[in-house]
Amino acid sequence: MTRTRVTLQRRLELTKKATKRRFSLIGIRRFSLNKRILVSLRSLKVKTNPKQQSPPVISAKAQGEGVQINGHGSQTRGNRILHGLLLFSALLYFVFFIAVALTRLTYPYALEWAEGGMLDHVHRILLGQPLYVAPSMAFTPYTYTPLYFYLAAGLAKFLGTSFIPLRLISLLAALACFYLIGLFVHRETGSRSTAFLSAALFAATFQISGAFFDIGRVDSLLLFFLLWGFYLFRFRQGAWAMVAAVLLFFTAFWIKQT
């Protein structure tokens, strides 16, 4: 009876060992089979999906120019026509503004209610009279700082006491603003077309902003010094550039502080 038990236990142990060997062999075979399948799928993917060329990189300048890039970097004819029409229509805003400003430059009467008072300030400077006096029926000073008046008075010594010196300063300042806006945008985007269109967009606001760009007021000259200061502050480095920007902001304050 004892021998029979021992024999049965040994057979049971042998059966367990044989079962473990079979499972281990099956696992090894499955692992090798899975590895073969993965290698086959990868090779199949490489054959069916060849490596494609990366799409061409479109620079910010090319996007700003309105260029459509294909594999060879060509530009369609339709886009060239639309791009040209857009630039031409933007150019018209500059032409119209300059034409209107030159027409109004020599107009002998006030174009806006404040122009007459601005000319009175210039006239007082030429006569050697103080600007900031107590208000009266004869003269009431504007609450503007005096730099614009003195610049116009200096120009009036050569052109005469009229609206021309005041309007000429505003006209030149407005043109300088167009240039600075275009320069600012060109430095930011690298696109000449975008810079041109940005300046033209500002010129297009001439009418809706009250047509103040070219009249005898302080606004255009103030904006010129502010834009110039912001340009130096944004794109120039070094202590001297920062000092120049601060001086330009200080000058803008002496044109209009309100």
Image: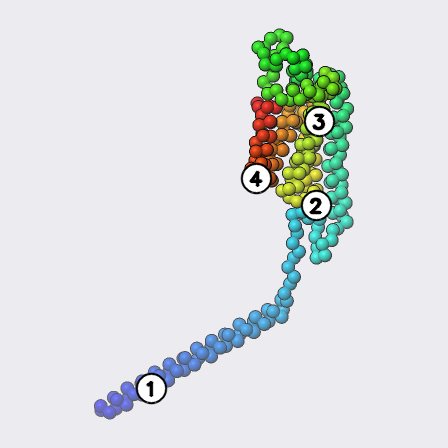
Asked whether disc 4 touches disc 2, contact meaning CB atoms under 8 Å apart, the reply is no
- The front one of 138 and 83 is 138
Q: Nearer the viewer, mark 2 or mark 3?
A: 3
Disc 1 on helix, strand or loop? helix
Write down the quadrant of residue 90 in the picture: top right
Mark 4 sits on what residue?
238
Mark 2 sits on what residue?
65
Disc 2 on helix, strand or loop? loop
Estimate the x, y position of residue 84 in percent, counting from the top left.
76, 42
Mark 1 sits on what residue?
14
Estimate the x, y position of residue 61 in percent, counting from the top left.
67, 47
Estimate the x, y position of residue 192 in percent, counting from the top left.
70, 42
Q: Nearer the viewer, mark 4 or mark 3?
A: 4
**Which numbered disc covers residue 59?**
none
Label 4 – label 3 distance at C-alpha: 32 Å
**Which numbered disc covers residue 171?**
3
Disc 3 on helix, strand or loop? helix
Residue at 62% x, 22% y is 147
Query: What type is the residue that disc 4 sits on?
Result: Gly
Q: Nearer the viewer, mark 4 or mark 2?
A: 4
